[in-house]
């Protein structure tokens, strides 16, 4: 039987001199930023290099973040999943080269990966489940796997409330006071600023002055984004399918905008083009049972049954070309 001293020495050996790279969903997503913050709090902020990216870019970012480094590190992939088989082979080589690789995700693309394929990569640890958000899956994994990463430190344990808020918001439960507000705040801060604030936030999730300013800014921006959506919305009833399709522009806060806009339509799919990141988001009204992940995949994207996203290559310059055509036609009539 191992003594307490033996266990402590084992934990030190597991993490002695370890640095980590974390690749997560962002830069506006509370769940993705909170996932990365779990890693930052466990290793210490100075020992972690975070990358925040959209799912469509994750394969490229995994390679760019890890190639040409002099020695193996720990790689955490959270709230996001690679798509290309070539990335499986790349991660497998990293593992052979001495990298410890961990992965936690709750999106459909993750859950549908074959367990045999994932095991063949040689990941040190992984969890793919829709039971909780990615941040909560990752937090629970880190706390319960001392054998692989060492004992969770106090900094990580004191992050539990923030993780539960991220889980409550990302799964759109909203039973915990403050989860919506925290999501808005993180979206306003974005990326590295948001990550830094969560790495240093206290156990009661008290806002710093910077976070309070961000929340005030986010509340105003959300109001403006909702107004933009109402000004630009176009809707069509598809009798053959028994649904409404509503399309609109927004400027950030897609879930919150869709939640507000969707109250005006029954059995509706909402398609929002986010001017902030130039991508499309899909949401649905409460009574709609269309699987948006399946719909988004047909368009090259993915996500959850009730919330998904995609991009369209052909969107680039489409509106501009339309404007040029109209101006050209009008000029000919002068």
Image (cartoon, rainbow, N blue to C red):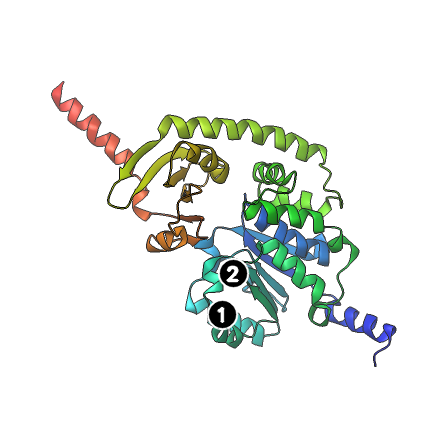
Residue 157 percent location from the top left of the image: 75, 55
Residue ranking furthest to the left:
333
Whether residue 324 appears in this view of the structure is yes
The number of numbered badges drawn on the structure is: 2
Against 219, is 272 above or below? below
Residue ranking furthest to the bottom:
1
Quadrant (top left, top right, bottom left, bottom right) of the C terminus: top left
Q: Which residue is mark 2?
A: 62
Whether residue 19 appears in this view of the structure is no
Against 41, is 235 above or below? above
Residue 279 percent location from the top left of the image: 41, 43
Q: Are marks 1 and 2 in contact (CB under 8 Å)?
A: yes
Quadrant (top left, top right, bottom left, bottom right) of the N terminus: bottom right
| Residue drawn at point x = 62 percent, y = 43 percent | 175
**Numbered disc 2: secondary structure:** helix
Q: Nearer the viewer, residue 236 or 239?
A: 239
Left or right: 7 as drawn, with respect to 68: right
Left or right: 334 as drawn, with respect to 312: left
- State the separation of the CA atoms marked 1 and 2: 9 Å
As drawn, the label of residue 105 is: none
Left or right: 130 as drawn, with respect to 325: right
| Residue drawn at point x = 74 percent, y = 66 percent | 17
Quarter assignment of residue 5 = bottom right
Comes first in the chain, label 1 or label 2? 2
**Numbered disc 1: secondary structure:** helix
Q: Which residue is mark 1?
A: 90
Question: Badge 2: how crowded within 10 Å, few (<14), some, or many (20+)?
Answer: many
Quarter assignment of residue 18 = bottom right
Question: Badge 1: how crowded within 10 Å, few (<14), some, or many (20+)?
Answer: some
């Amino acid at each position: 039987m191992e003594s307490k001293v033996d266990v402590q020495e084992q934990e030190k050996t597991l993490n002695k001199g370890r640095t980590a790279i974390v690749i997560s969903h962002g830069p506006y997503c509370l769940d993705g930023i909170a996932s990365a913050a779990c890693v930052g709090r466990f290793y210490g902020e100075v020992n972690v290099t975070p990358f925040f990216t959209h799912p469509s870019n994750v394969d490229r970012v995994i390679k760019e973040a890890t190639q040409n480094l002099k020695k193996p590190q720990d790689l955490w992939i959270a709230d996001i999943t690679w798509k290309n088989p070539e990335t499986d082979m790349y991660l497998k080589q990293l593992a052979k080269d001495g990298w410890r690789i961990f992965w936690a995700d709750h999106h459909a693309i993750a859950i549908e990966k074959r367990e045999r394929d994932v095991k063949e990569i040689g990941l040190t640890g992984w969890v793919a489940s829709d039971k909780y958000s990615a941040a909560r899956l990752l937090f629970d994994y880190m706390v319960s796997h001392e054998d692989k990463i060492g004992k969770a430190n106090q900094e990580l344990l004191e992050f539990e409330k923030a993780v539960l808020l991220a889980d409550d918001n990302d799964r759109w439960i909203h039973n915990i006071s403050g989860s919506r507000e925290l999501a808005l705040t993180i979206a306003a801060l974005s990326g590295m600023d948001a990550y830094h604030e969560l790495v240093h936030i206290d156990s009661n999730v008290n806002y710093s002055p910077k976070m309070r300013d961000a929340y005030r800014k986010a509340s105003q921006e959300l109001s403006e984004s909702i107004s933009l959506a109402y000004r630009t919305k176009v809707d069509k009833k598809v009798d053959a399918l028994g649904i409404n399709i509503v399309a609109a522009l927004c400027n950030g806060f897609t879930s919150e905008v869709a939640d507000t806009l969707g109250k005006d339509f029954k059995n509706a799919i909402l398609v929002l083009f986010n001017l902030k990141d130039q991508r499309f988001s899909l949401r649905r009204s409460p009574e709609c049972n269309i699987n948006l992940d399946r719909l988004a995949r047909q368009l090259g994207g993915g996500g959850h049954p009730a919330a998904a996203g995609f991009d369209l290559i052909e969107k680039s310059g489409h509106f501009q070309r339309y404007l040029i055509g109209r101006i050209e036609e009008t000029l000919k009539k002068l």
